[in-house]
Structures are given as C-alpha cells and as structure tokens.
Image: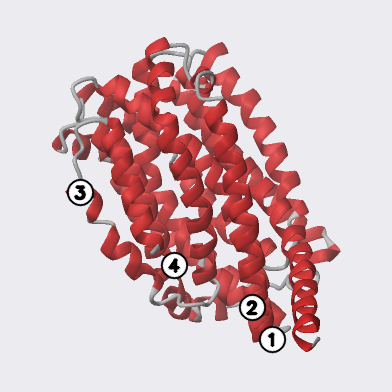
Amino acid sequence: MEESSTGKWGWMKMREELKKVGTIAAPMAVSSVLQYLLPVVSLVMVGHLNQLSLSSVAIATSLTNVSGFSVLSGMAGGLETLCGQAFGAGQYEKFGLYTYTAIISLSLVCFPITILWIFNDKILTLLGQDPTISLEVRKYAIWLIPALFGSAILKPLTRFFQTQSLISPMILTSAIALCFHVVTCWTLVFKLGLGHVGAAISFSLCVWFNVIMLLSFVRYSSACEKTRISFSKNALVGVGEFFRFAVPAAVMVCLKWWACEILVLLAGLFPNPKLETSVLSICLTISTLHFTIPYGFGAAASTRVSNELGAGNPQAVHVAVSATMFLAVTEGFIVSATLFGCRHILGYAYSDDRMVVHYVAVMIPLLCLSIFTDSLQGVLSEQRASGLELSLAPLSNRFSFPLLLLLPTGKNRQLWQGKEYLMLNHQT
C-alpha cells in the first residue's frame, strides 16, 4: 500500500513537472525555431539562384558558425548558470550585472573574429577549397560582421529573458524579425539583384532589429522591473567570473557545433564540390533546424534546474530532468518518422536541381538517426550548462571530436556516418 502511494505521489510530481517544463519548453522551442529560420531563409532564397551561390553561402554559414556565432552562443550559455541561480535566489541586481558583463565580454571577443572573417578566403584556399567559392564566401562573411556584433547583445538578452521564463517577448520579436527578413531578403536578392550578398545584408539588419525590439521591452515593460538596473562599473569587475563559466560552456557548444559544420568544409574537397556541399549543407540545415526543438526543451529544463538549485530544492532537479527526457524521446520519434515519410519531396524546398533533391532523399535515413540522437544530446547538454557537471561537460566533446577525423570521408554518406558515430560517442 505504501509503495502504491509512493508511486502515485511520484507520478503526480512528474505530471506537475511536465506541465511546468512544457509551459516553458513549448514557447522556447518556438522562439528557437524562429531565430534559426533566419539563416535558413537566406539559404533557401540563395539556393534558387544557382549551385555556386548555394555552395558559397553554405560554406560561409558553416565558417561563420564555427568561428563566430557558435563561440558567442556557447559563452552566453554561462548565463544560464549565473543568471538562473541569481534569479532563483532573488538576487535581482546581480542578475542584471551578469547580463551587462556578458554583453561586454562577448563584444570584446568579436574583434579577433572579425579579423579572421576578413581573411577567410585565403584560409579556405590554403585548406584546398575552390578559389571561386572561397572569394564568394569572403564577400558573404564580411557582410555578416554587423550581425556578429549584434549577436553579442542578442545572445545575452535571450538568456536574460529565458532565465526569467519570459518567453513570449522572444517569440513575438523573433516572429516579427523573421517576417522582416523574408521580405527584405527577397527584395535584396531578387529585386535589387544583390544575390547572396543581399541575403547577408538582410540577416544583419534583422539581428539588430531583434536587438532593438528586445531592448525596448526591457526598458518599458513592467515584467522586467525587478531585473532592470542601470549600468555599473561592477559589470567590468565580473568579467573574470563570467569567463570562468563561459569558457567551459563555449567549449561544450563549440566542439559539437564544429563537428557538424566541418563536414561542409570537407565536402568542399570532393570532385564535385558544388553538388556535395549543397546536399550536405541542406541535411545539416534540416538537422540544426530540428535541434532548436530539443534545445528549447533543454533550455526550459535548464531554467527549472538552475532556479530550483538557487532556491535550495535539489529534489525538484531530478524530476525536471526526467520530465524533459520523456518529452525529448517522444519528440525525436515523431519528427524522425515524419521526415522519413517526406524524404522524396523535402529537397525541393531548398533547390530546383533534381540531382540535389535525389541525393537529399538518399541521405534522409541517416538524417533520421541524427534527429533522434540530437533530441537526447540537446537536452543533456543543457543540463550540464545549468550547473550540473559544467566543468566536466567539455571532456566528452573534447575526446569524441577527433574521432570524426579518423573516419572515412570519401562520400557524403560516410561523412554523415562519421558525424553520427561522434554524436553517439558523445552521449555515452
């Protein structure tokens, strides 16, 4: 009788936690998808120009993700621990200072990244990439530099809202920015004839548009009244503490991100780089677009975990993790099955080239495996970032990342199999 009562109490706790996590996870996943759709829109628009533009933007997106946006996203992850626990403990002034510190730190990191982007065509040529593609990659990356500095503000702002469970403003601003990007990108790429450069300009404009909208909400909304503080020089003093949390979080995110994006760069070394790069970039775009969903689940659980740790409720942490894993497994199965059923028509969303569409369909079964494993990995990574094993989290990526380079890379299927082997190794 006692065991039955305990089991019933445990299920009630789980159901209650599922509601709490779902309340945060669903809008967070929507917000993440909307934000990621910005580069996807650019890729789709450019993909209907020609293979050179598609492959150039694919490599440029991979390069800028690897060397810039992944670094900023990873470092901003340190706020999930700092801001989450500060908010849970009711230390609102410290919460605001952490956000200022993150913006300053990320802005400083942007300067060396900018120099790298300016000379990336020479780096790509040395790595064996096609000189024509490398030059177009450089043009695209240079026009993304404003977006880089905008992201140095946007990433911390996203964590600022996330750790307070204020997801609705992010959904609204992301949706408006996406609509703005669709119209602007189409106008610049096709109507004004700027080609793939127009897509980069549009992306940069949308990032800053999103930043302005979120800052306006912080300034005028009563929901941010407790955590809205004036800038203080104490934000500069906290840079060292922020880097102590940001660096492990960045390593954890970057190595996983790099393992995926390096596949596109390797595809550029194949005999037909335009076709191979286009196909693999489409698969990675789909995979990463899906990853925003388990990332939303993980971010919701991360918020719950850090808040409960800050409030001194360790028992609630285990329930939150279990509830999130249940959601992740269910979501991964549904999306994988849907993707497999649409494999023969999915490629047409990105290209009119029948060869590209055919090879995308061939890659879909491997992509389905990726979808399911990413559902688990996304949630587990966010748990580590919320304060659980943060300093040890990069080790799994650090040891599994080199395995990708030891696997055969003669074809796209082998590259993707290598990626899957790495991800499975990372989860175990």
Query: SS at mark 1?
Result: loop
Residue 4 sits above or below residue 174 on the image: below
Q: Residue 43 location, x and y as percent?
A: 48, 27
What is the three-letter code of the residue carrying label 1?
Asn
Q: Residue at 21% x, 37% y: name it.
A: 409
Numbered label attached to residue 249:
4
Q: CA distance from mark 1 to mark 3?
A: 43 Å
Q: Which mark is in front, 4 or 1? A: 1
> How is colour applied across the structure in the image?
secondary structure
Numbered label attached to residue 317:
2
Q: Which mark is in front, 2 or 4? A: 2
Who is closer to the viewer here, 41 or 101? 41
Q: Residue at 48% x, 21% y: name it.
A: 347
The answer to whether marks 2 and 4 mark residues whose Cβ atoms lie closer than 8 Å is no
Residue 354 sits above or below residue 152 on the image: above
Query: SS at mark 3?
Result: helix
N-terminal of the pair, mark 3 or mark 2, is: 2
* Residue occupying the far right of the picture: 222
Where is mark 1, residue-wise?
313
Numbered label attached to residue 405:
3
